[in-house]
Amino acid sequence: MTLFHFFNCAILTFGPHAVYYSATPLSEYDTLGTSVKAASVYLGTALVKLVCLATFLKVSENDSFDPYQELLKALIGFIDVAGLYFALTQLTHRNISQNHKFQAVGLGWAFADSVLHKLAPLWVGARGLEFTWDYILQGLEANANLVLSISLAALGSLMWLRKNKPKTLIPIIYACAAIVATMPSITNYLRRGLGWHFPKVVGFELFTSLVMAFISWQLFSACQRPSS
């Protein structure tokens, strides 16, 4: 029963990444190499963030919300944006379209994040004797992160790769990218500052990921239309 629960949670956490790859044109264009490169960049970015967090953040003696510490975390979190910039603009990719490139990069980014942050807790906790909803909620959280990562990659693609985008959309693109990039700090504030329970936070993440995905899709479509 414990292994069955573990495999269910693991499929919920990592399965959508495989489904997304196989159900979209990414598999037809063999973009797996691009996703692997993006995952490698994510691991390097995570290492840099870890060093920065260990260097500049103080160890809190309690679990209270510290605005200064959270602001510093949010600023350090923008290292992810720099990593995505490198993955989108500096890595060598196969001859694939901009649409497929940002999806492949976002997919690899999200998968690496799930492996780094979800696999060990799943392996240690989901095989426990007592059933808990926490690991199912972590799987749902990983799904929300998948959508947010692809949305951020789409917004990054518009910011850095598309030159002829409408000027009126540029502030909206940057504002949406900033919101997605600071989502970890936002959810941390909800959990520690406002005292939201984990299920409520996950529900907020799922709702926000769908909203940002819709906005990113609309912005991407608008930027692809020929300018009049």
Image (cartoon, grey):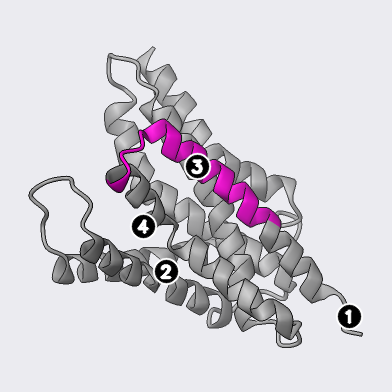
User: Which residue was labeled with disc 2?
Assistant: 80
Q: Check residue 65 for magenta coloring.
A: no
Mark 4: amino acid: Ser
Coordinates of residue 50 in the picture (x, y in percent): 24, 64
Q: Can the viewer see residue 48?
A: yes
Coordinates of residue 75 in the picture (x, y in percent): 33, 72
At horizontal 59% and vertical 41% (from top left) the residue drawn is 16
Label 1 with label 4: CB-CB less than 8 Å:
no
Mark 2: amino acid: Asp
User: Which residue was labeled with disc 3?
Assistant: 204
Q: CA distance from mark 1 to mark 4?
A: 37 Å
| Sequence-first disc among 3 and 4 | 4
At horizontal 25% and vertical 61% (from top left) the residue drawn is 67
Q: Nearer the viewer, residue 181 or 86?
A: 181
Q: CA distance from mark 2 to mark 1?
A: 31 Å
Q: Can the viewer see residue 157?
A: no
Look at the numbered disc 1 and give the secondary structure of its residue. loop
User: Which residue was labeled with disc 1?
Assistant: 226
Q: Nearer the viewer, residue 208 or 148?
A: 208
128 vs 158: above or below: above
| Sequence-first disc among 2 and 1 | 2
User: Which residue was labeled with disc 4?
Assistant: 185
Nearest to the eye among marks 3 and 1: give it: 3
Q: Which residues are magenta?
A: 193-214
Nearest to the eye among marks 2 and 1: give it: 1
Label 3 crowd bin: few (<14), some (14–19), many (20+), radius 10 Å? some
Quarter of the image with the N terminus in it? top left
